[in-house]
C-alpha cells in the first residue's frame, strides 16, 4: 500500500496539473497539481524516492495532456494503428524522466520545495532543446488566456514556468506555517491564471488577410477522388468577394501542404490559384523537390503564377517528417508519417523573413515550428507579422489542434506580433500581439475568414533577450546550490 501511494498520489497530482490544458482549460488545476507534487516531494526521504515521485507526477501530467498523440497513428490504422498505445506510453514515460531529474535534483540541493523552483524550470528548458526539443504542454502554456500569460512578453515560457513553480512552492511553504496565507496565494494564482487581461484593443492596420480552411480530413486529403474537391474548395474561397464592410484582401493564406502536387510539377495548379486570387499574393504550403530531397515548404505566389518567395521548414517532426536513425528504422519497416514523396523531408537552413510587396515582412512558420519560442525568436530580423500554415488534421478534432493554437498565441505575445494562422481543418485565426483571437474558423468547418491585421507592438523584452539570460541564471543558481549542498554533506560526515 505504501508503494502504491508513493506512485498513485503523484500520478493523480500530475493528472490534475494536466487539466489546465485544452480541452479542459482549468489553469488553476495546473497550479494545484504542481503544488501537490511539490508537497509530495517534501515527504521523500531519499533521492531515489524523489526521482520516482517526480517521474510519476510527470507521467500523470504528460499522459493526460498529450493523450491526443494517438491521432496521427489512427489516420492509417492498418499501417500505424499498432503504434498508437506505445506512442502515449513511451512518450509520456520518456518526458516524465525530465521531471524525475527535477525532483531528484531538488532533493539533492537540500532546499526543500525551493530547490524545485530552480530544477523544474531548468528541465523544462532542457525539454525545449534536447533531442531537437519537444516543449509541447509546458506549464506556461495554460496561462495564455489570463493575466499571467502577458508575462510571456517579458520572460518567455521558461520564465513563466519559473513564476508558476515559485508560486506553488510559496503556497506549499505557507501551508505549513500560515494556512490562510497559503490559501491567499492559491486565490491570487487562480485570478492571474483565469482572469483575462483588461487591455485596450490592438490598433488595426490597413492590411486585410484572408485565411482559407478547406477542412480536408487527413484520411481523405490524398484520396484521388477527393483531391479535386478540396482544391476547388480552396479556389472558390480564394475568389470569393470581399467580406461586407471590409476591402478586398491584401494577401490570401492557405494551409500547410495545401495542394497534393509537388511544387516542381504544379504549374497548372499554380496558375489556377493565381487566377482565383487576381492581383493578390497567395501564401501557401506545398511540398517541393530539390535534387534527391523533398522539403515541406511555404511559397508566396505572385499574380503571374510565379513563386516570388520560398521557405523550407527547418524544424522537422521526428518520426512524422523524418526518421532518426533512418537506416535502422528502415530495416524495421518503419516510415515517416507525413511525407508523401520519398521517405521523409530534408530540413531547410533555418528561420528567415520574407519581404512580400504590398504586405510587409513576414516570418513564416510551418506547423510544428510554432511550438518553439527560441526558433521564432531566432529569425534574422524582426517581421511585421507571423504567418503560420499548419495541417492540424494530423492532431484529430479535439485537444491537439486547440493546444497547438494556444502555443501559436504564446508566440504572438512573446514577440509582440500579429499572427495569421491558416489550418487545414482548423483552427484558423487572426491573433493580435497580446495573444487574443480576433477572428477564427472553428474546428471541422470549411470556409474562409477576412480580417484586418493588427499592428505590431514595439519589440518585447523577451524578443530582444531570448532564453539565454534566464537560462544562464537558472543553471548558475543550480550549480551554486549543488556546490553548497555537497559542502554541507562533507561537513556532516
Image: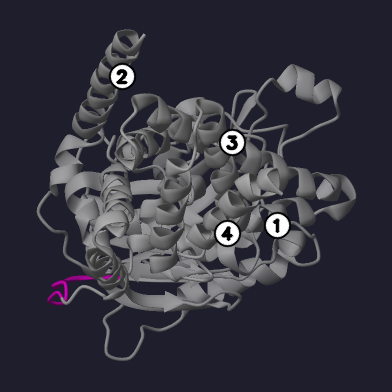
The mark that comes first in sequence, 2 or 4, is: 4
Q: Residue 58 at what x, y percent from top left?
A: 55, 45
Callout 2: helix, strand or loop?
helix
Q: Is residue 73 left or right of residue 12?
A: right
Q: Which residue is mark 3?
A: 52
Query: How many residues crowd mark 1 within 10 Å: few (<14), some (14–19), many (20+)?
Result: some
Q: Furthest-right residue in view?
A: 78
**Image marks 1 and 4: residues in contact by CB distance under 8 Å:** no
The mark that comes first in sequence, 3 or 2, is: 3
**Number of the front mark, 3 or 2:** 2
Q: Residue 59 at what x, y percent from top left?
A: 61, 46
Q: Residue 42 at what x, y percent from top left?
A: 42, 42
Q: CA distance from mark 2 to mark 1?
A: 45 Å
Q: Which residue is mark 4?
A: 392
Residue at 71% over, 67% down: 228
Q: Is residue 483 above or below residue 20?
A: above
Look at the image and give the residue range highlighted in magenta.
199-208
Q: Furthest-left residue in view?
A: 458
Asked where in the image residue 243 lies, by quadrant, the reply is bottom left
Amino acid at each position: 500500500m505504501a508503494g502504491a501511494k508513493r506512485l498513485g498520489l503523484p500520478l493523480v497530482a500530475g493528472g490534475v496539473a494536466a487539466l489546465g490544458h485544452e480541452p479542459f482549460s482549468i489553469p488553476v488545476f495546473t497550479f494545484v497539481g504542481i503544488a501537490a507534487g511539490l508537497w509530495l516531494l517534501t515527504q521523500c526521504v531519499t533521492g531515489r524516492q524523489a526521482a520516482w515521485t517526480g517521474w510519476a507526477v510527470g507521467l500523470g501530467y504528460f499522459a493526460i495532456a498529450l493523450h491526443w498523440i494517438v491521432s496521427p497513428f489512427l489516420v492509417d490504422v492498418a499501417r500505424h494503428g499498432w503504434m498508437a498505445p506505445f506512442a502515449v506510453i513511451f512518450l509520456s514515460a520518456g518526458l516524465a524522466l525530465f521531471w524525475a531529474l527535477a525532483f531528484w535534483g531538488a532533493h539533492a540541493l537540500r532546499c526543500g520545495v525551493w530547490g524545485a523552483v530552480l530544477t523544474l524550470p531548468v528541465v523544462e528548458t532542457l525539454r525545449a532543446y534536447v533531442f531537437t526539443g519537444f516543449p509541447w504542454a509546458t506549464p506556461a502554456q495554460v496561462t495564455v488566456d489570463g493575466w499571467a500569460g502577458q508575462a510571456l512578453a517579458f520572460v518567455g515560457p521558461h520564465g513563466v514556468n519559473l513564476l508558476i513553480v515559485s508560486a506553488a512552492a510559496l503556497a506549499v511553504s505557507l501551508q505549513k506555517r500560515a494556512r490562510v496565507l497559503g490559501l491567499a496565494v492559491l486565490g491570487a494564482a487562480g485570478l492571474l491564471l483565469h482572469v483575462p487581461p483588461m487591455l485596450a484593443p490592438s490598433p488595426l492596420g490597413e492590411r486585410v488577410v484572408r485565411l482559407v480552411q478547406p477542412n480536408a480530413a487527413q484520411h481523405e486529403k490524398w484520396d484521388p477522388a477527393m483531391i479535386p474537391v478540396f482544391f476547388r474548395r480552396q479556389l472558390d474561397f480564394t475568389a470569393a468577394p470581399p467580406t461586407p464592410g471590409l476591402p478586398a484582401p491584401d494577401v490570401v493564406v492557405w494551409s500547410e501542404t495545401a495542394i497534393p502536387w509537388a511544387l516542381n510539377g504544379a504549374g497548372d495548379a499554380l496558375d489556377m490559384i493565381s487566377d482565383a486570387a487576381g492581383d493578390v499574393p497567395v501564401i501557401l504550403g506545398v511540398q517541393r523537390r530539390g535534387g534527391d530531397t523533398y522539403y515541406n515548404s511555404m511559397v508566396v505566389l505572385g499574380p503571374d503564377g510565379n513563386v516570388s518567395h520560398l521557405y523550407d521548414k527547418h524544424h522537422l517532426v521526428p518520426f512524422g517528417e523524418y526518421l532518426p536513425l533512418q537506416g535502422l528504422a528502415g530495416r524495421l519497416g518503419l516510415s515517416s508519417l507525413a511525407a508523401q514523396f520519398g521517405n521523409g523531408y530534408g530540413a531547410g537552413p533555418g528561420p528567415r523573413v520574407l519581404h512580400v510587396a504590398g504586405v510587409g515582412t513576414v516570418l513564416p512558420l510551418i506547423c510544428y515550428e510554432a511550438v518553439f519560442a527560441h526558433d521564432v525568436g531566432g529569425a534574422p530580423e524582426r517581421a511585421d507579422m507571423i504567418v503560420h500554415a499548419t495541417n492540424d488534421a494530423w492532431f484529430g478534432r479535439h485537444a491537439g489542434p486547440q493546444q497547438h493554437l494556444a502555443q501559436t498565441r504564446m508566440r504572438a505575445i512573446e514577440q509582440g506580433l500579429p499572427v495569421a494562422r491558416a489550418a487545414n481543418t482548423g483552427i484558423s485565426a487572426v491573433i493580435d500581439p497580446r495573444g487574443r483571437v480576433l477572428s477564427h474558423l472553428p474546428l471541422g468547418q470549411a470556409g474562409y475568414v477576412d480580417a484586418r491585421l493588427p499592428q505590431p507592438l514595439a519589440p518585447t523584452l523577451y524578443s530582444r533577450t531570448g532564453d539565454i539570460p534566464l537560462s544562464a541564471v537558472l543553471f548558475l543558481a543550480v550549480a551554486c546550490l549543488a556546490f553548497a549542498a555537497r559542502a554541507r554533506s562533507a561537513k556532516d560526515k
